[in-house]
Image (cartoon, rainbow, N blue to C red):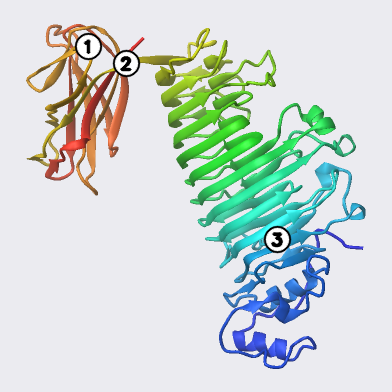
């Protein structure tokens, strides 16, 4: 009988390399000539893999890991070799596992798996630190191996768990087959997780009726769904994570209603999340955290590409691409967990919603959706949306109470887009559709120097595009001759390291009672704003640098104006 969830234990003393080699030399399995001054230590140095892929190597691997505890060295696997695991491995602090392209095969049997999905705890590798978040484990490396699971439908096993660790490195891991949470992390201080792939994990069992939306989840990378003593993860670098064909079917899908599977499910503070992709699954990025940055999220035949929910705040993502989603490309939603607010998502492409008619008719698909009914949803921005949702599909839907000051600006419809309307646009959500790029100008040469701490107008003298002459240049300002709503974007090149304030200023010289209006971005390279402009209004750009500096010419210093619908 193989008992999951319990590590195979071995020597606990932290040894020097001389001590490790001495331990090996005194063991029955140590071969003559094994002592050496250089080179990595392999699993086979601690026991024989008699029948690769069939011999249970968990005790052998655990012996090697325990012997290397605290040494700062990783246990190596042989390239191209299969290692069967019949029990959980526990990685001590100060070591790791270097796969060199080897394959791990979790061997879990029916007698070891509870039918209660909520109580299942089978795990392949536990690389967690201790219980005190003030003393995180150091030195963890998990790198370059494959995991192949042949669990039967109705069996449960998770892949890797890492809690309470400082600056771990997890990279180059490829999962295939039926696992639930491939990598579960919590309470991490910095660290890098990159180049992780997962595919072909799906099941139909409802586990005796115990399955719920929460415990049905299949996830490639989970950050902070569980934490140590409530302490959040901070400052992770998450890069190049992908998932394919991760879903429920049959009784499982009937129980949960829609695919419960994510590529990245993240909360915490200050993460950098980039290059995430998914195909035929639930969500590509399901983010609950704060002050994350990044982007390049791609989803095809998924429920949602980017989901900002459960109190997600002050996040900035750029480059979202969705095709043939079942529900939407992008959603902002407040829930009982908290208000979702002050998020900015730019350069969104949404093409072909719900082509197979999988979504509920009462839900209503849309390129972008705002929901505020349970926790509030406000001050979220979508900057630039290229929309081709398909016949009779919505561009934007906003529903529920608690919506305020949300904005989708810069919408462009592709030429062959056939739309009925924008959807149910709530009073708490404004929509700005771009009709055309009316004006695009640059600086032809460097200007300056301009003085420190003084507001100085930025002059633009190289007209790239002027389609309708709705603005005339007069004394360095752009004067409106056709009133309307415009999207204005400007950027000023100052070179690296210059702190500054960037302003768009709108004044009305012919209307003394109307005070100038300005929009300010502090420390940002560009500024975008939707502005209602009257005939004769003057618009100019100004900069306040923290030191004397020259304004760069070329396309880094620009002004673009789009006419809205």
Residue receiving disc 2: 436
> Few, some or many C-alpha atoms within 10 Å of disc 1 (few <14, some 14-19, many ≥20)?
few
Q: Which of disc 2 and disc 3 is earlier in sequence? A: 3
Q: Position of residue 188 (x, y in %)?
A: 57, 55
> Few, some or many C-alpha atoms within 10 Å of disc 3 (few <14, some 14-19, many ≥20)?
many
Residue receiving disc 1: 468
Q: Residue furthest bottom?
A: 32
Q: Position of residue 542 (x, y in %)?
A: 17, 29
Q: Secondary structure at mark 2?
A: strand
Q: Secondary structure at mark 1?
A: loop
Q: Which of disc 1 and disc 2 is earlier in sequence? A: 2
Residue for point 81% across, 42% down: 118
- Asked if residue 133 can be seen in this view, the reply is no
Q: Disc 2 vs disc 1: Cβ atoms closer than 8 Å?
A: yes
Residue receiving disc 3: 126
Quarter of the rendering occupied by the N terminus = bottom right
What is the distance, in whole Å, between disc 3 and disc 1 at their CAs? Answer: 64 Å
Q: Is residue 521 above or below residue 428?
A: below
Mark 3 or 1: in front is 1
- Asked if residue 409 can be seen in this view, the reply is yes
Residue 389 circle label: none
Quarter of the rendering occupied by the C terminus = top left
């Amino acid at each position: 009988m193989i008992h999951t969830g319990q590590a195979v234990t071995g020597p606990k003393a932290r040894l020097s390399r001389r001590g490790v080699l001495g331990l090996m030399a005194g063991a029955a399995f140590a071969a003559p000539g094994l002592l050496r001054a250089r080179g990595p230590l392999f699993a086979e140095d601690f026991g024989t893999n008699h029948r690769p892929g069939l011999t249970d190597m968990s005790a052998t691997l655990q012996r090697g890991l325990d012997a290397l505890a605290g040494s700062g060295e990783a246990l190596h696997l042989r390239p191209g070799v299969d290692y069967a695991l019949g029990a959980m491995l526990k990685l001590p602090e100060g070591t790791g596992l270097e796969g060199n392209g080897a394959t791990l095969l979790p061997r879990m049997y029916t007698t070891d798996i509870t039918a209660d999905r909520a109580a299942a705890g089978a795990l392949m590798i536990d690389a967690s630190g201790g219980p005190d978040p003030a003393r995180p484990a150091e030195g963890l490396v998990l790198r370059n191996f494959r995991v192949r699971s042949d669990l039967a439908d109705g069996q449960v096993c998770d892949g890797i768990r890492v809690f309470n660790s400082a600056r771990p490195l997890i990279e180059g891991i490829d999962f295939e087959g039926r696992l639930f949470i491939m990598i579960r992390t919590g309470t991490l201080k910095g660290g890098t997780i990159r180049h992780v792939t997962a595919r072909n994990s799906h099941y139909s069992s409802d586990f005796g009726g115990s399955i719920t939306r929460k415990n049905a989840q299949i996830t490639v990378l989970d950050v902070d769904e569980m934490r140590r003593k409530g302490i959040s993860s901070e400052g992770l670098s998450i890069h190049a994570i992908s998932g394919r064909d991760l879903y429920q079917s049959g009784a499982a899908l009937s129980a949960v209603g829609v695919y419960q599977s994510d590529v990245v499910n993240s909360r915490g503070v200050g993460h950098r999340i980039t290059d995430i992709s998914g195909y035929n699954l639930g969500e590509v990025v399901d983010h609950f955290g704060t002050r994350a940055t990044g982007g390049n999220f791609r989803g095809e035949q998924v429920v949602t590409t980017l989901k900002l929910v459960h109190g997600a705040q002050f996040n900035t993502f750029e480059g979202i691409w969705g095709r043939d989603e079942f529900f939407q490309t992008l959603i902002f939603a407040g829930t009982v967990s908290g208000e979702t607010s002050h998020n900015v998502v730019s350069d969104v492409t949404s093409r072909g919603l719900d082509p197979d008619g999988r979504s509920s008719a009462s839900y209503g698909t849309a390129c972008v959706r705002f929901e505020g009914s349970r926790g509030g949803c406000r001050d979220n921005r979508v900057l630039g949306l290229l929309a081709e949702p398909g016949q009779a599909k919505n561009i934007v839907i906003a529903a529920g109470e608690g919506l305020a000051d949300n904005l989708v600006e810069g919408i462009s419809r592709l030429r062959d887009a056939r739309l009925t309307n924008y959807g149910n646009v709530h009073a708490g959500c404004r929509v700005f559709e771009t009709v055309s790029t009316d004006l695009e100008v640059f600086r032809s040469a460097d200007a300056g120097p301009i003085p420190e701490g003084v507001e100085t107008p930025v002059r633009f003298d190289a007209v790239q595009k002027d389609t309708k002459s709705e603005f005339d240049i007069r004394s360095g300002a752009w004067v409106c001759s056709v009133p309307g709503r415009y999207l204005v974007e400007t950027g000023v090149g100052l070179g690296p390291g210059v702190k500054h304030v960037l302003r768009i200023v709108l004044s009305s010289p012919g209307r003394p009672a109307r005070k100038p209006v300005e929009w300010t971005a502090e420390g940002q390279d560009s500024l975008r704003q939707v502005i209602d402009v009257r005939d004769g209004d003057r618009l100019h750009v100004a900069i306040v640098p923290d030191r004397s500096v020259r304004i760069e010419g070329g396309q880094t210093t620009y002004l673009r104006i789009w006419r809205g619908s």
